[in-house]
């Protein structure tokens, strides 16, 4: 913003340099924002992979999970529970 204000008050000789400064700063900000977005995508991809793995494990152990929940609901103790 300060460079924008500086541009508004600059004389005609200073305006091209101010525009270059603005472009440089905008490129830096853009790169920072894209890096942040890239890191967010990486995080979300890892989280999705973990959720898929969890879903796969739960699907493979569906019977055991249901039996444990059933036993808990009907008051039967689970000797393997921590």
Image (tube, rainbow, N blue to C red):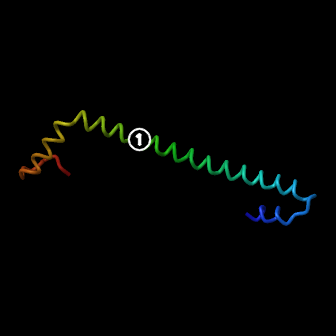
Quadrant where the N terminus is found in the figure: bottom right
Front residue (pair 69, 16)? 16
The quadrant holding residue 15 is bottom right
Residue at the outermost top position: 60
User: How many tags in the picture?
Assistant: 1
Identify whether 33 is placed above or below 61: below
- Image location (x, y in percent) of residue 77: 9, 50
Question: In the figure, is residue 41 to the left or right of 27?
Answer: left
Residue at the outermost right position: 13
Identify whether 20 is placed above or below 41: below
Label 1 neighbour load within 10 Å: few <14, some 14-19, many 20+: few
- Image location (x, y in percent) of residue 45: 46, 40
Identify whether 67 is placed above or below 25: above
Front residue (pair 81, 24)? 24
Which residue is denoted by mark 1 in the rendering? 48
Please name the residue shown 30% across and 38% down the image.
55
Please name the residue shown 42% across and 44% down the image.
47
- Image location (x, y in percent) of residue 69: 14, 47
The quadrant holding residue 38 is top right
Front residue (pair 70, 77)? 70
Question: In the figure, is residue 47 to the left or right of 80?
Answer: right
Q: Secondary structure at mark 1?
A: helix
- Image location (x, y in percent) of residue 41: 51, 43
Question: In the figure, is residue 1 to the left or right of 45?
Answer: right
Question: In the figure, is residue 6 to the left or right of 77?
Answer: right
Please name the residue shown 45% across and 41% down the image.
46
């Amino acid at each position: 913003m300060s460079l924008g204000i500086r541009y508004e008050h600059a004389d005609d000789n200073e305006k091209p340099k101010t525009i270059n400064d603005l472009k440089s700063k905008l490129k830096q900000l853009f790169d920072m924002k894209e890096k942040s977005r890239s890191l967010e995508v990486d995080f979300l991809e890892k989280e999705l992979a973990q959720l898929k793995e969890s879903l796969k494990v739960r699907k493979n152990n569906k019977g055991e999970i249901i039996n444990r929940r059933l036993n808990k609901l009907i008051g039967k103790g689970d000797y393997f529970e921590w």
